Image (cartoon, grey):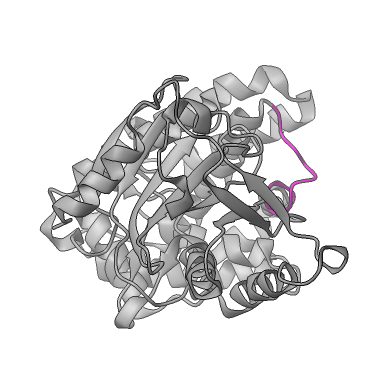
Amino acid sequence: MISAEVMNTVTSLFDAAGPNTARDTACWHELYGRSARSMLVPDRSLSVQRKCIRMFRPQWHQALAGDLQLLRQRLPAQFSDARPFAGFGLPDAAWAHELGLRGLCDAVIQVGTPGPYQKATIGFIAADGEPLAMAKIALGKSADATVSNEAQWLQRMERFETLRGWMPRFVSDGITKTGRRYLITDVGPSGGAATSCLRPRHTQFLQHVGRASMKPFEFRASPCNKRLIDNLSLLEPRIPANARQLLRQVHRDCVERLKGWVGPFTIAHGDFAPWNTLTPAGRLYVFDWECAWQGANPLYDLLHFLLMPRVLRRLVSAPGHRHMRSVVERARRYAQDTYPEWPWERTTVSALALQYLLDLIVYYGVADSTIKFEHPVIANYWRLLEDRKLWMS
């Protein structure tokens, strides 16, 4: 249970600031300023700042880069590229003025990746730098829906006893004075790091989620297919004719190959990837539930974990048809173990893999109001759609 002290700290930060509220008592230093995701750490001791970094950058190389920047900001001004922000002067974060956060000096702020769903995450810390709670705030109208969706899913998932301790616990949510949605959760277990390898604990988590709320459907009548049809209808008017033709043909392939098959459609995290997981004390902790949805392809999260990191790692070759064959076989074994009540022929699993690729491309396309073929995920997944006969046969 979260303590009353922590609750008081969190709620007091969201009290409305009075007209005479001091605006020059807090100061942050920007780290990772050259990346798309900058971080603001409070002007506190080095040990506290290092703890702040590790709240959001647990990987050793990320934390080391932050530590080096912390040391550089202690050099004379001519040798340091640190940028101090005093009071409420936060870049691109007008919500700070409206929230009236009296005590932001006790917080670390992570600005999310730019785009329609950009958010800021605030880690509230104690005097010694230990985390107390987390807040996520939408930085634009489009991000409101994802913050709201995550709040709803965290509350819903609390009903499933098998998932307790695997994910953040909902504390509060609401709307700021500027109309932006926010969400507050606990901080979860400390320690651990992300791993790009699919471990037994990952599989166990996916099995808990998959069986928590599953319903059988024939694919054509499934919520999964309905979502795809709805998103395709939104996207098609905004893309070239040749792209529209390929998407329609791939969708017909999915429907044809899954004709007559009945299987479970389940809850999906929606972005189950190493960067949204931690492994404290040998367990698994999964956060960022903003893309979660019901009625998903039962292999969606597994396929996402196996494919997405490989697409985004520049030192690894993109998944081609040979790699996709091994992914399909791995997904088939997982499906047989997790859902033994249903048949899992290779043709079925490969069709569900095709549906996953198509769904993600279309989902990204709707968010961006077009298909950005230069995006590494779109580029690689699109190639897999074009080469589908090579890995589905």
Task: Locate residue 334, reporting x and y percent.
Answer: 35, 69
- State the image quarter where residue 68 is shown: bottom right
Residue 142 seen by the camera: yes
Q: Nearer the viewer, residue 52 or 252?
A: 52
Image quarter (top left, top right, bottom left or bottom right) of the C terminus: bottom right
Image quarter (top left, top right, bottom left or bottom right) of the N terminus: bottom left
Task: Locate residue 14, reporting x and y percent.
Answer: 34, 34
Task: Locate residue 317, reporting x and y percent.
Answer: 74, 71
Q: Residue furthest bottom?
A: 282
Look at the image and give the residue range highlighted in magenta.
Answer: 370-380
Residue 218 seen by the camera: no
Q: As drawn, is 101 to the left or to the right of 28?
A: left
Residue 377 included in the magenta stretch of the image: yes
Q: How many marks?
A: 0
- State the image quarter where residue 200 is shown: bottom left
**Is 53 located above or below residue 112 in the figure?**
below
Q: Residue furthest top?
A: 237
Q: Nearer the viewer, residue 165 or 79?
A: 79
